[in-house]
Amino acid sequence: MEGAANWQLPVRADARRNINALLKAAMTVFATSGVDAPMREIAEQAGVGVGTIYRHFPVRADLIVAVCRNEVDTCAEAAATLAAQHPPRKALSCWIDRYIALVSAKRGLAAALHSGDPAYDGLPAYFENQLSPALDRLLKAAAAAGEIRSDVSARDLLWAVAGLCAPRRTDNFELARRMIDLLLDGLRAAPDAAIDAFATKI
């Protein structure tokens, strides 16, 4: 997978700009036209020649892997920024919104990721290894502030949110968002108090 790693290596500023433009364009095109979209469509969106794509990503799988890793890295890095800008629970909620956007965007890549191609075998572990620590730090900060329960697993929450965002026949994202909001409400601290209050009414 040499091509998939090349975009991360130190390169000239102009080449780095081309790579960033390609990754952004590819994500947009894959989300709307699927991973089999013509390379020329991606090149046009990025404002580069088709040859530039193949220079950095010799085969299509290299580009798909690079796009996935770049999107995951961006989402993971957002955790620290949000933690510095907001109170713990607000930072957690904002990051979950970013994660939902990532999972929703990945729908355009689903055909490739579930194709059985060994080129993508390492991606699930990469997703979890990058995103779980980022989410775990947000969860611990919110728990330390007394804003959420302290027994929430980052891995469990990642899988739960991803499951709620999975494609459905109606593609009803508003419903998925409401379900995720209910899930996040369940993370609030002092659930026993709520249970006791309910018990007194029955």
Image (cartoon, grey):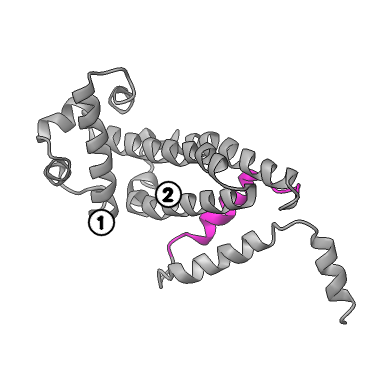
Q: Amino acid at mark 1?
A: Thr
Q: Amino acid at mark 2?
A: Leu
- Residue 26 or residue 116, whichever sits in front: 26
Secondary structure mostly seen in the magenta stretch: helix
Asked whether 152 falls inside the magenta stretch, the response is yes
Labels 2 & 1 near each other (Cβ < 8 A): no
- Residue 84 or residue 183, whichever sits in front: 84
> Taking 26 as reference, is 98 left or right?
right
> Taking 38 as reference, is 158 left or right?
right
Query: What is the span of residues highlighted in magenta in the rendered image?
Result: 150-167
Measured as percent of width and height from the top left, residue 90 is found at 59, 52
Q: Residue at x 48, y 49 (%)?
A: 99
What element does badge 1 sit on? helix
39 over 177 or under it: above or below: above
- Residue 119 or residue 40, whichever sits in front: 40
- Residue 43 or residue 159, whichever sits in front: 43
What mark, if any, has residue 32 been given in the picture? 1
Task: Give the class, few, some or many, for how many residues have Cα within 10 Å of label 1's Cα (few <14, many ≥20).
Answer: some
Measured as percent of width and height from the top left, residue 55 is found at 17, 25
Q: Earlier in the sequence, mark 2 or mark 1?
A: 1
What element does badge 2 sit on? helix
Q: Residue at x 22, y 48 (%)?
A: 36
Residue 196 lies in quadrant: bottom right
